[in-house]
Image: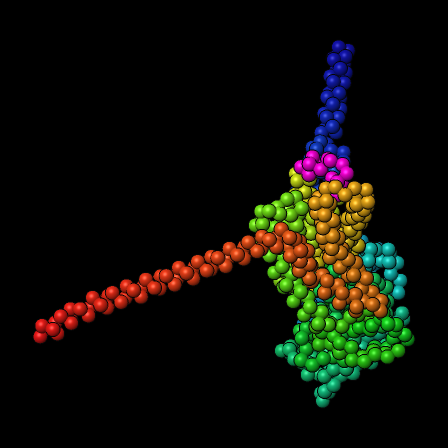
Amino acid sequence: MRNRNLLLPGLLMLLLLTLGASAQNSRDCAQWCPPKSTCVNATACRCSPGFSSSSREIFTSLLESCDDINECGPPSAVSCGKFADCWNTEGSYYCTCSPGYKLASGAKTFRDESENMCQDALTPNQLLLSPAGIFFPTWTPPHGIKSQRLSHFFERVQDLGRKFIPAFVQDTIQDLVQGVDELLETPEDLEALPRSEQHCVATNLLVGLEDVLRNLSQALPNGTLTFNASAGTDLSLKVREQGDRNVILSQSQVKMLLNWDVVHESDDSGASVVGLVSTPGMGKLLAEARLVLEPERQAVPHGAHKGVLRGVSSVLLSHVISAFMSNRDTQNLSSPITFIFSHHSVTRGPMQKVFCVFWDHTPDGYGHWSTTGCRMVATGDTSTTCQCTHLSSFAVLVAHYNVQEEDPMLAVITYLGLGLSLLCLLLAALTFLLCKTIQNTSTSIHLQLSICLFLAHLLFLTAINRTEIKVLCAIIAGALHYLYLASFTWMLLEGLNLFLTARNLTVVIYSSVSRVMKKLMFPVGYGVPAIIVAISAASRPHLYGTPTRCWLHTDKGFIWTFLGPICTIFSINLAFFLMTFWIVKTKLSSINRDVSSLQNTRMLTFKATAQLLILGCTWCLGILQVGPAAHVMAYLFTIINSLQGVFIFLVYCLLSQQVREQYKKWFKGVRKTKAESEKYTLSSGTMSDASKHSVVRYAVLPEHFTNQSS
């Protein structure tokens, strides 16, 4: 009985210790670990095998998540060996034999290259009918796009790849085109994606379908294959037959004409194939895509600020088509390919123009419509003929804006005007810096304004078109953004200084305010633009630099990071000038003493008003380049804007009596120095001649005496 009584407390104590240890372990384990992870301790988690976080293997941040590792790549982390494909699954992967091969064991999957026993699965008859090296290429969905509809489509593509047999290639091609057709007919949740992601999906579909069809078409027999899907997607494939010289592929909405010599330019020894796919449903995914014109077709304000690009809205007129051939090198064809598009009737207005374009995409899948390498041969109400020197995905667009043809006269005015302005700005800056008699707060503002404009114009002339290196172009765009904003900020300080000068006529507080302004004008003049540019660059750095100019993109209203501050500064300056004019008018009508100070204020008001017109109204002219008067506004904008430096030098230097007097002193000093230099040179020459005569005389005397003695 005693042993039983001792045993019971012992068991109870053991149970309590076990529960205590369990509770301690529970307290030591983090409860916030995301799915597909396990806790390490109370503050850290580790992703499960097959998953990874964005930081390290062990992480402590609540914001981390464990995402599936794509072992199949690219780049591939595993190797399945020859005649095998890698398939990624959530948290793992598996290998299968390529179409036309099977495992000797009869199994469907295996783990890695060491287990690869893939061998030919075709019958002898199928081997005779199938060309060597024909396979269904890997086609993966775009990275980062979450869509259930798209996932179902790629499951279907993977199933076609697993079941592909070259002898039945026509069936595979038709099933693939039908799948794309159904996806575009009922995109479902794809239409809810942001526009940029829709464009990325469209790029993936266009490029992926072209790549698969190019490979599979190598197994087709000679002749033509056509297929019309239920929702309107059309496919035409042509395999070259002996004696063929020209190719004509016709569909209901497009016709393509080319020469077989263009197709067979490569050293590829395979069959020569040309393909054409028309996808009417692709227009849904490519809606609102940007149109980027070649530089000579770009409608931008000409002149010193033609980097301010305006948005080009466009509408698809035709189906989106993809043209491809067995020759993969199609970026610079020896002869152009002709496309004849049929489209719905369109009546173009004075603000519209038709363009032949292609889909220009980046490696990450995003893109835009471009006209590079394509030209419009002819267009009518229901058809347009295009010629392109490369192959890609094409369409016909109508652009809803006024396209200005390149005017060489505007370019000449711009470069001549800016060159003259740079000279005048340099002279003005030297005047403000060296002329001691006029140096004050106002002169200091003029000096900084001249420096900012000089640097901005110089950078524009030398680097606005340097778009070859994207990072360098973005830096140039940011620098121009900063320099022009700094110019307008100094203009705002000029308006404030003018108002305070006029205010001093009625309220004697100018000295204290002037001291405060001297302390704050440099931080404001250079600091405020720096803050604006820094915030803009940090929020949307990719919008600095465009395909044609090193300036700000118009996407998402980004151009207003420049126009917004300028419009604000112009409005504030206008208020300052109105108050200044009112003060001057009141003073003139009430009192006639202190005439000298009043005359100085009136002259300063005139100069600042002229400066406001020079810097403010030119940008208004740039914004007003729309409608029938656009061409006139472009000329006014270019002429006035490119001569900013000339006006600054005229108003602040040549029209200033003190500056003119200083110029006279400098000129007199230069003339005096020149005269003294000439006098010194003349006297030096006279002395030199005299010394020469002395030397000659002393040289002749001995000879004379020698002759005499003889």
Q: Is residue 231 visible?
A: yes
Query: For the magenta stretch, what is the residue range?
Result: 500-515
Residue 103 in which image quadrant: bottom right
Percent position of residue 390, x then y: 71, 74
Q: Nearer the viewer, residue 374 or 44?
A: 374
Q: Is residue 163 visible?
A: no
Colour pattern: rainbow
Percent position of residue 26, x then y: 75, 29
Residue 365 in which image quadrant: bottom right
Which residue lies at the image location 69% right of the left edge and 35% below the top edge? 512
Query: Magenta-highlighted stretch: main secondary structure?
Result: helix
Is 506 covered by the magenta stretch?
yes
Is 39 covered by the magenta stretch?
no
Above or below, 505 against 28 in this view is: below
- Locate the C terminus by quadrant: bottom left
What residue occupies the far front of the structure in this picture?
592
Percent position of residue 619, x then y: 76, 58
